[in-house]
Image (cartoon, grey):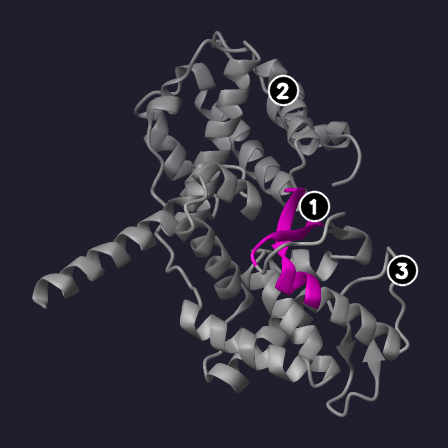
Amino acid sequence: MDGNFINHQSAVTGIVKKEFYNQEPFAFSKLSSLLIRFLNQLKKNGKSSNTISAYRNDLTLFCEFLVEKQTGPDNYSYPAQENWLHFLKENGRNSQSSVRRAQMSVRTFVHFLVSEKVIQGSPFLESKSPKQPVSILLTVPHEKYLNLSRTLKHLAYSKDEKAIRDWTLILILGECGLKASEAANLSWGDVWPELEEPTSEISIAGCLKVTGNNERLVPYHLEVATALSMLKDAREQMGLTTELDDKLFFGYLNVSRKTRTNFLHRHGIKFVIYEVCSEILGVPYNSESLRNHAILRWLAKGIENEKVASLAGYSSLHSLERFLNSREKKKTSSRKIKTKE
């Protein structure tokens, strides 16, 4: 998916060359170029190649539908919307998630057409897409998180190199709210210590530069700084480099720890989290549970929703809804318990 999307014009050229007896007000001859412009805009906005590919597949199908039904996105009213759902099923889109994604792709494309003044409006923008099922919020309870952190910290101070790595990893996920993939890509050049010495355990000691689609700076406190310092020393003692481009987390190729690797990939990090949580807590929590713990703690501390979304790398406040709902449920349960007493 690299480069300009002009190469993908052939994907829809056949669609727009069809002739009509009754031409709609919308210029079908522009569909191909408009779709290419839209895909290029997604690329400029930093969308991943997989996301852009999904949009292209959905919208190519939508263009086929418009041509077949001789209707335009500006005239997309009922029963055209029902026909679109049937068209999706006829083309193998049977799952609700696939249909929902296709509808959201079209909605985004129609918004683009309106913003580009290609069309004035569309009834599609007034229609509702199927709601996405609310996923269960996986999180490590704070008491268990503290137990996990204390245990690994104790082992780390005994100079156990694996414990030092695991403790630092737990803190970066559970305190800084990074994803496993983001933690795997952290290099020493992404660790930015503060110039001044922190005055307390909770004061900001530095920040992590998280790169990728949602690039951001995430602050960390003194305990994380201590763990990072110990991790750096451990790497050097193990004969692993700590240059700016070197990754933070090392791995092992065997149980005996004799064969070390200087890089722990995303799946390796997920395995480490399962392993450590199972051994210490008896529960195989995953990396997402630790990230969610960080986000819930930020909200509990009273940090503004916009700031929390920024720290977590979310592009929209809608992503925080399940966290906010989880907090409300806890408050309601707390009130019920107090009432009973």
Report x, y in % for residue 160. 72, 84
Left or right? Give the position of 27 relative to 163. Answer: left
Which residue corresponds to the image point at 78% horizontal and 30% vertical from the top-left? 4
In the orientation shown, which residue stands out farthest toward the bottom? 256
Give the labeled residue for mark 1: 212
Q: How many labels does the image show?
A: 3
Which residue corresponds to the image point at 89% horizontal and 60% vertical from the top-left? 243
2 or 3: mark nearer the eye:
3
Dividing the image into 4 quarters, which one contains the N terminus? top right
- Please tell me whether residue 294 is drawn above or below residue 145 in the rendered image: above
Q: Residue 243 carries which label?
A: 3
Secondary structure of residue under mark 3: loop
Dividing the image into 4 quarters, which one contains the C terminus? bottom left
Report x, y in % for residue 184. 71, 62
Between discs 2 and 3, the one toward the N terminus = 2
In the orientation shown, which residue stands out farthest toward the left? 340
Q: Distance between the residues labelled 2 and 3?
A: 46 Å
Secondary structure of residue under mark 1: loop
Q: Nearer the viewer, residue 328 or 304?
A: 304
Which residue corresponds to the image point at 65% horizontal and 30% vertical from the top-left? 39
Q: Which of 96 and 30 is in front in this view?
A: 96
Q: How far apart are marks 1 and 3 (CA)?
A: 20 Å
| Magenta stretch, residue numbers | 202-226
Q: Distance between the residues labelled 2 and 1?
A: 27 Å
In the orientation shown, which residue stands out farthest toward the front? 199
Report x, y in % for residue 232. 80, 68
Quarter-of-image position of residue 156:
bottom right
Which amino acid is tagged 1?
Gly
Give the labeled residue for mark 2: 34
Which amino acid is tagged 3?
Glu
